[in-house]
Amino acid sequence: MTSASFKPTVGPALRTVMTAAGAAGLAVALTACGSQDGSGSSDAARAADPQAGGTGGGDSTTGSGDGAAGGGTVLAKTSEIPEGGGKIFKDRGVVVTQPTAGRFKAFSSQCTHQGCAVGSVSGGAIVCPCHGSEFSVTDGAVRRGPATQPLPAQDITVSGDEITLA
Ligand code: FES
């Protein structure tokens, strides 16, 4: 446990920034663990956790604050969704995308061709692994067949940095 020590070269201003970032990361970790057990996103949360503990010095007030959103099901933090790409939430049957900065969309993750679950998001497309159909991250439209119908849009609400499935 020697990795938690500060380097003396870090100035007070930078340390303040890092502490704020660490607290935010801790909040993400706590929320992710509470609402997404077993999903792949917990890896990212765990990766951020040691940094939060090391620089934040255990800021428990942030974690116990406003973690629970009113109504709906919290899917993710906005920071989890890559700009120009997206993230698939298999167990929720939804894929959330961020076509442009700060603009979020959600679609069914069930391919409209023969019902496979879409498998990845890359190059601005949501890709089905079964027969190679591709759908736009912007509006779910078919970019490549054999699918002919767009992915149905799903209602989400973005509140602060939290994305909630309606
Ligand atoms: Fe998705 Fe065929 S089920 S491409």
Image (cartoon, rainbow, N blue to C red):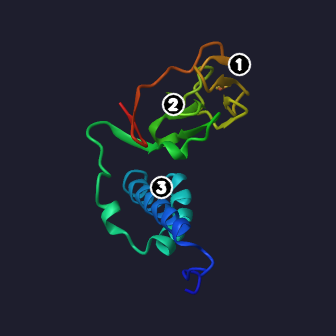
Question: Between 73 and 66, which is closer to the camera in this rendering?
Answer: 66
What is the number of the mark on residue 15?
A: none
Amino acid bearing label 2: Phe
Instruction: Write the residue at 56% across / 33% down.
Output: 97
Mark 2 crowd level (few <14, some 14–19, many ≥20, 10 Å Cα): many
Gap in Å between the C-alphas at discs 2 and 1?
19 Å
Question: Furthest-bottom residue in view?
Answer: 2
Mark 3 crowd level (few <14, some 14–19, many ≥20, 10 Å Cα): few
In the rendered image, the quadrant that contains the N terminus is: bottom right
Instruction: Write the residue at 41% across / 25% down.
Output: 155
Amino acid bearing label 1: Arg
- Describe the element under mark 1 as helix, strand or loop: strand
Placement of 157 over or under 75, stated as above or below: above
- Label 2 lies in ligand 1 vicinity (Cβ under 8 Å): no
Instruction: Report the residue marked by disc 3.
Output: 38
Quick check: 41 left or right of 127?
A: left
Q: Nearer the viewer, mark 2 or mark 3?
A: 2
Instruction: Report the residue marked by disc 2.
Output: 104
Percent x, y for residue 87? 57, 40
Circle nearer the N terminus (1, 3): 3
- Describe the element under mark 3 as helix, strand or loop: loop
Instruction: Write the residue at 38% across / 42% down.
Output: 74
Question: Furthest-top residue in view?
Answer: 148
Amino acid bearing label 3: Gly
Instruction: Report the residue marked by disc 1.
Output: 143
Question: Between 75 and 80, which is closer to the camera in this rendering?
Answer: 80
Mark 1 crowd level (few <14, some 14–19, many ≥20, 10 Å Cα): some
Q: Nearer the viewer, mark 1 or mark 3?
A: 1
Placement of 37 over or under 84, stated as above or below: below
Question: Between 74 and 64, which is closer to the camera in this rendering?
Answer: 64
Pointers 1 and 3 in contact (CB under 8 A)? Answer: no
